[in-house]
Amino acid sequence: MKYRLGIDVGGTNTDAVILDENERVVAKCKEATTPDVSTGITGAVEKVLKISGVRPSEISNAMLGTTHATNAIVERRGLARVGLIRLSAPSGFGIPPYIEWPDDMVKTTGGLFRIVKGGYEYNGQPISIPDREEIKEALTELMKGGMESLAVSGVFSPVNDDQENLVREIAEELFGNDFPVTLSSEIGSIGLIERENAAVLNAAIRKLAEKAYGGFQDVLKQHGIHAELFITQNDGTLMSIEYAKKYPVLTIASGPTNSLRGAAFLSGLKEAIVVDVGGTTTDVGILTRGFPRESSSAVEIGGVRTNFRMPDLVSIGLGGGSLITAKEGNGSVSVGPESVGYRITREALVFGGTTITATDIAVAAGMANIGDPSRVKSLDRVLVQRSMDKIKAIIEEAIDRVKVSAKDLPVVAVGGGSILIPEDIRGASVVIKPEHYEVANAIGASIAQVSGSIDGVYDITTRGREAVIEQVKNEAKEEAVKAGADESSVEVVELEEIPLAYLPSNAVRFKVKAVGDLKSK
Amino acid sequence: MRYIEEQDVEYIAIGAAVLGAGGGGDPYIGKLMAKQAIRRHGRVPLLSVDEIDDSSLVIPSAMMGAPAVMVEKLPNGKEPETAFRTLEKYLGKKADAVLPIEAGGINSCIPIYTAATLGLPLIDADGMGRAFPELPMVTFSIAGIPSTPMVVCDEKGNKLVLETINNAWSETLARTATIAMGLSSMISIYCMNGKELKNYAVRGTISLALEMGRRITESSRSNINPVDSILEISGGFRLFEGKIVDVKRDLTTGFVRGTVSIEGTDSDSGSSFRIDFQNENLIASKNGRPVAITPDLITVLDREKGFPITTEALKYGQRVIVIGMPCDPFWRTEAGIRQVGPRYFKYDIDYKPIEELVKENL
């Protein structure tokens, strides 16, 4: 038998699950997340192996979901000094790199850059021809400035990455093959500023990610697990650990995505609303065709604008640890947003504390059996009822906000705090609390698929629209296979066609994504 | 006289997207350039039309091209100055002020950049009071002011001076040049004297955009819905509140043509709404009956924060409030309707002012 190991490193807990070949959950566990991350992972791996009785050699694939990279950027911790080459001259000087970055972020990453000849027009013609000597000279100057990691951006590089690759080649000639180089074309889509920002962030966190993912590899090796290793990325699909070490910035939104994907898997539903209740907050998202619906606005990470697409979530201040406060006078009740957070196991009534939390209300209402239920027996019935009504109203409002039509949809409740969710919710056709709901994140990581995407501007006059669509679809599929997907399972899941407005030029921007199952070793 | 400070540019960009009526391009790139220029050269004096002498020379400055290209190939930064100075040289006269040609979208911010860079004042007016996709769609053109001599230039340093037989030819030739330049160029066009400006400009549009943006920003900070406050200063109407249930884009032409369907919520629960757009929002109908028609302005706002949503960013599931605002009276003349009314955009419907349509639908 072959097994898969899925691990999710969250802010509070590190969860691990083992799935068998038929994608049945064999074992699951939760450990506290540790500041160094790998101690927590070690604990979870040891525990889940023990519970399952699975031999380490039987694990063929291991998937890790972690927001380590995001935290490093937000906290400005362990970031490298980055040198940036932008291929765009004579264009681009009007808006130099690092524009609108927070000052402390520019300071931490160094703010070094050079704009050199290069870049492409929308139709693939070069804006100017890159000059090897100029690039060499620029790289040498950046190195003198203390560059530890190189980022390269170029105009329309998602359409043609030749020039960015040329810079990498020259950098490797000068600094050796081990010098970290990040190409913007590998990361982002159209939108030079946002793609370049993402490339610089990626360059800044490479060393740190290499260490973190290396630690994950070591932990598994030490436990005799010689599986193929993957890291989950923003869109809920996988990348190989070697690729993730080069492009760690692609993991920044993986947390909520994994939870939504896990909920889809556990419930077997492809169209549903997912309510993920944690200790302090609840994220409500929506699944369409089994994937999270993405938000349309630009996403800022640590104050830096990027064009990553995040799942479109409504976050509300409701969780298992939310404080219950009765207002003087009219007897109305408020729930959250203040929460006891991770101190719930000491401060909640059912755990022997003195604070009334949402969990205590759920236990008193008979919805859950946690801690010592006798400790909430004396709670005022009216308070319990009013609190439950309030919780229900908060969740209903959030559900209504994410919905795309008035039609009732199934609601899948996951996360440790989902005991709060009542059976009967307005707007829900049914409320499902699937088994293993508390480890939906880790399950989402372990069942993740592999994707490939294409984003570029194409001229549809010469070959016609149909032929171009066929071409971009095939290109996306090839990318998915390259990333490790089983060819027979690959299908196109997204095809966006955006004509370039204001000019009847027949230039169309296509964004295509293909997804397939992971090819087993 | 007042001044445009760096922070004001943020406000103008938001307000310009409201006046963009769904089009005009995302002001983001223009905003970044304008803010930088003010940081480098200092704040920009904003003059009302009445502060300009009749004999003064004013020259507009604008960007032309595809927004999807503008976010990739960023300007060199010298183009607006080059276009402006080349036109001055051709005319043999120095300009006294920079004039925005289009208050909606990205072209609200480019003239701020130009003014700051050249050390000239900016005029608080424009030639549209909104956004439109073609060069002859300005009040000045309706009034018979020639668009040429005009200058088109690119980031490489190429520049063209055009003298055309009419404004339609300017559109054709400038667009052809812009395509060859890589779908993005900077232009200076419709130079005029202070007297012509006073007669034909849409007045106060930059300060209107600024005020709208300020109100939206401040409301969103204090979690107050800014819609009523926007309607108050624009004389507009709240047309519909609901959730976008469908966005269709017709992909066969070079222009973004399409429709968005909105299902009513709150007080509009049970009603349906539809907007027909071609870059800009052109016709809004509630339950099948038109409630606003171009050239009146139709803008879709985010329901929570009141931020404007362009036609490119419209998406399934967004919660929105649609507002309509009356256009400048100039557009309501026969010549104006011929140039930018519904029939010009190939809709088989006659223009009626929004005030009348709203009353009929009460």
Image (cartoon, coloured by chain):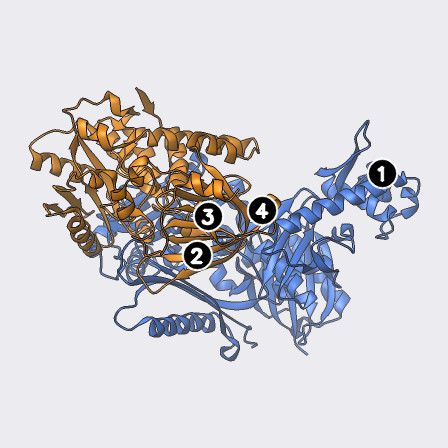
Chain colours: A blue, B orange
Q: Is residue A60 toward the left or the right of residue A480 in the image?
A: right
Q: Is residue A357 toward the left or the right of residue A124 in the image?
A: right
Callout 1–callout 3 Cβ contact below 8 Å: no
Residue B259 circle label: 2
Q: Chain of mark 1?
A: A
The reply to whether residue B100 is visible in this rendering is yes
Tag 1 residue: A383
Amino acid type for the residue under numbered disc 2:
Thr
Q: Quadrant of the N terminus of chain B?
A: top left
Tag 4 residue: B268
Q: Nearer the viewer, residue A206 or A454?
A: A454
Marks 2, 3: nearer the viewer: 2
Q: Is residue A475 toward the left or the right of residue B196 in the image?
A: right
Callout 4–callout 2 Cβ contact below 8 Å: no
Residue B175 is situated, as x and y percent measured from the top left of the image, at 20, 52
Amino acid type for the residue under numbered disc 4:
Asp
Label 3 packing within 10 angstroms: few (<14), some (14-19), many (20+): few
Residue A489 circle label: none
Marks 1, 3: nearer the viewer: 1
